[in-house]
C-alpha cells in the first residue's frame, strides 16, 4: 500500500491518507497518484472483507 493506513475500531473502518504526498504519474499518465492500496486488500482483522482504494488528482 502507498500512503494509506487502515484501522478497525469495532465496526468502524478508518482510512488515513496524507494528501500532501504524491507518487508520480499513473501508468496511463492521466493522473497523479496520491495513495493506493495497489489492488484489493483485506481490512485489518477481517480477512474476508476487501477494499480497493485509489486517491489521485489530474496533472
Image (cartoon, rainbow, N blue to C red):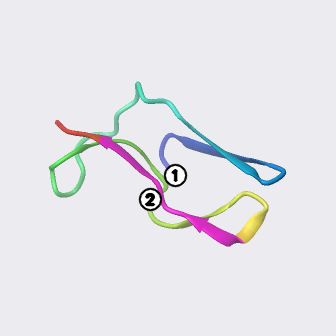
Residue drawn at point x = 66 percent, y = 69 percent: 49
Q: Are marks 2 and 1 in contact (CB under 8 Å)?
A: yes
Residue drawn at point x = 79 percent, y = 61 percent: 45
Graded by Cα atoms within 10 Å as few (under 14), some (14 to 19) or many (20 or more), the crowding at tag 1 reads few
x, y percent for residue 56: 32, 43
Graded by Cα atoms within 10 Å as few (under 14), some (14 to 19) or many (20 or more), the crowding at tag 2 reads few
Left or right for 16, reference 56: right
Q: Distance between the residues labelled 2 and 1?
A: 6 Å
What range of the chain is rendered magenta?
48-56
Answer above or below: position of 54 versus 35.
below
* Secondary structure category for the residue under label 1: loop
| Residue 24: in magenta span | no
Q: Name the residue under label 2.
A: 38
Magenta: predominant secondary structure element? strand
Name the residue nearer the viewer: 11 or 47.
11
Outermost top residue: 20
Name the residue nearer the viewer: 23 or 18.
18
* Secondary structure category for the residue under label 2: loop
Q: Mark 1 points at which residue?
A: 1
Outermost bottom residue: 48
Residue drawn at point x = 72 percent, y = 71 percent: 47
Amino acid at each position: 500500500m502507498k500512503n494509506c493506513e487502515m484501522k478497525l475500531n469495532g465496526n468502524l473502518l478508518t482510512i488515513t491518507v496524507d494528501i500532501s504526498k504524491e507518487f508520480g504519474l499513473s501508468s496511463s499518465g492521466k493522473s497523479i497518484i496520491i495513495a493506493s492500496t495497489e489492488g484489493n486488500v483485506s481490512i485489518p482483522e477481517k480477512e474476508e472483507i476487501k477494499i480497493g482504494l485509489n486517491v489521485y488528482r489530474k496533472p
